[in-house]
Image: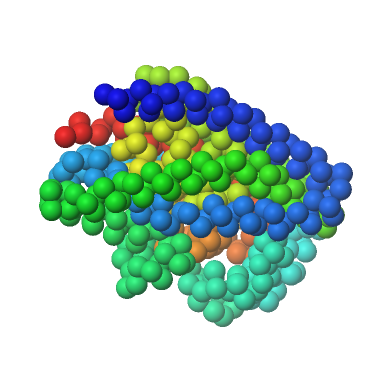
């Protein structure tokens, strides 16, 4: 009984701090964008500060995923109780990803951003620059827009065959997914931040521990205490979040503003940019809240506000994995049980990609509308929907999966891969918005799956 009072006191003390931190992060993003617009070269020079903060977030992801997933399974009390919440989580991921794709297709067909809005000179330039191999063209474009070297980008696209014709297939996704469920070296997977095999191992190992009862009491206590310590480290790290996020956002926006091409490219494909944002907004503010309300009968927008710190971090880092520690903390502070967040959120950060699926479907239709001589019929758009859904769910086995799965979606309906160059110039900014939607989808999933959890026993 004596432990309850301090615990509740701590929780009430944390809330004002959390609110203050959310406001500080929001203001730091606004100030960073303003600095990037006014003094882009100054802003770009802040890259080192943002990179340090991002690396510190990523540094804690692997140990936190391992301990939090194990704590989530151990919290079930018996591995046999894992079936219902596990099925609910997978079902939620599939349904929301499919709904996101449908929203993307509806919006892009209503607005038709590729019809008469893209300058023909820009189309001709993209096509002429793609006269070499599409893979080489895409590699060069990605390297220019992302800041990576062409060697690093080639590593990303290593699963695609070389030659003048790139023919990636959906089987690439399933092959990589199946192989990434297990690993021949858990430490190598941890070093490469390959979360899926770590999650699978953690679930199996923790499930085994639930059957051993008193024999493993010291191990389960160690795992629980390690998880608590790691979350305390996250809270300490978040004290530096406003400064780190300021540097992250300022450097990326400053770089885009300094090269002088971003606004020009945005004016060319502004309708496409607005269409994708509109689709993401519909999914984030209507579809996901509707699911939350139907399952929990609570105000979803209050929950959205409670998750704002994680959502702002997701926008700043453009990484669901880097945001994972903050998502876990915010979900618990929003009232979702620790058992649910620890089990659902890490898995969702790996395979639940609503925003990415919506973006890929909308981008494919936009390219079909803009490219001369292409007009996708209903069944071809159904193929786009199915491919984008499966690709987003099963993309965990490919590094930088969005780049490769975009090629797979285009290839599924025979669209020219070189026209992907139309959208790469604004992809870095859209990536931040779709990552934010991905993270919100993960947090909603934790709240939904909580209703299927068994009583702790």
The residue positioned 37% from the left and 47% from the top of the image is: 227
**Residue 404 seen from this side:** yes
Q: Quadrant of residue 447?
A: top left
Image position, residue 283 (x, y; %): 51, 34
Q: Which is nearer the eye, 439 or 218?
A: 218
Q: Quadrant of residue 27?
A: top right
The residue positioned 41% from the left and 46% from the top of the image is: 229
Residue projecting furthest to the bottom: 163
**Residue 383 seen from this side:** no
Quarter of the image with the N terminus in it: top left
Image position, residue 80 (x, y; %): 15, 45
Q: Which is nearer the eye, 183 or 52?
A: 52
- Image height check: is 338 above or below 171? above
The residue positioned 47% from the left and 35% from the top of the image is: 330
Quarter of the image with the C terminus in it: top left
Image position, residue 186 (x, y; %): 35, 68
């Amino acid at each position: 009984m004596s432990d309850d009072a301090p615990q509740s006191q701590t929780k009430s003390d944390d809330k004002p701090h959390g609110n203050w931190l959310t406001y500080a992060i929001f203001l730091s993003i606004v100030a960073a964008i303003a600095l990037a617009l006014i003094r882009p070269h100054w802003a770009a020079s802040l890259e080192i500060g943002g990179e340090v903060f991002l690396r510190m977030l990523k540094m804690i992801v692997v140990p936190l995923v391992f301990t939090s997933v194990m704590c989530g399974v151990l919290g079930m009390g018996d591995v046999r109780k894992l079936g219902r919440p596990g099925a609910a989580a997978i079902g939620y991921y599939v349904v929301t990803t499919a709904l996101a794709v449908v929203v993307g297709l509806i919006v892009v067909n209503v607005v038709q951003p590729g019809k008469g809005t893209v300058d023909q000179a820009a189309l001709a330039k993209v096509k002429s620059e793609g006269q070499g191999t599409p893979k080489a063209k895409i590699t060069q474009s990605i390297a220019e827009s992302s800041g990576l070297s062409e060697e690093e980008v080639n590593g990303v696209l290593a699963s695609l065959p070389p030659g003048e014709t790139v023919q990636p297939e959906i089987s690439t996704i399933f092959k990589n997914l199946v192989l990434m469920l297990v690993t021949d070296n858990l430490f190598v997977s941890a070093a490469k931040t390959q979360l899926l095999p770590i999650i699978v191992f953690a679930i199996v190992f923790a499930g085994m521990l639930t059957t051993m009862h008193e024999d493993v009491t010291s191990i389960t206590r160690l795992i629980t205490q390690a998880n608590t310590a790691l979350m305390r480290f996250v809270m300490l790290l978040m004290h530096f979040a406003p400064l780190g996020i300021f540097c992250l956002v300022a450097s990326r926006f400053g770089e885009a503003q300094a090269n002088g091409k971003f606004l020009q490219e945005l004016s060319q494909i502004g309708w496409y940019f607005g269409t994708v944002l509109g689709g993401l907004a519909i999914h984030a503010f209507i579809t996901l809240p509707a699911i939350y309300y139907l399952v929990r009968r609570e105000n979803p927008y209050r929950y959205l506000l409670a998750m704002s710190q994680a959502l702002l971090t997701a926008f700043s880092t453009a990484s669901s994995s880097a945001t994972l520690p903050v998502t876990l903390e915010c979900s618990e502070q929003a009232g979702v049980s620790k058992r649910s967040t620890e089990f659902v959120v890490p898995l969702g950060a790996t395979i639940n990609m609503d925003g990415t699926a919506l973006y890929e479907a909308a981008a494919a239709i936009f390219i079909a509308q803009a490219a001369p001589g292409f007009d996708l019929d209903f069944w071809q758009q159904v193929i786009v929907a199915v491919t984008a859904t499966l690709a987003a769910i099963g993309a965990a086995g490919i590094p930088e999966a969005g780049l490769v799965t975009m090629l797979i979606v285009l290839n599924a309906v025979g669209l020219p891969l070189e026209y992907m160059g139309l959208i790469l110039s604004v992809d870095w900014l859209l990536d931040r918005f779709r990552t934010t939607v991905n993270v919100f989808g993960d947090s909603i999933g934790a709240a939904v799956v909580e209703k299927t959890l068994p009583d702790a026993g």
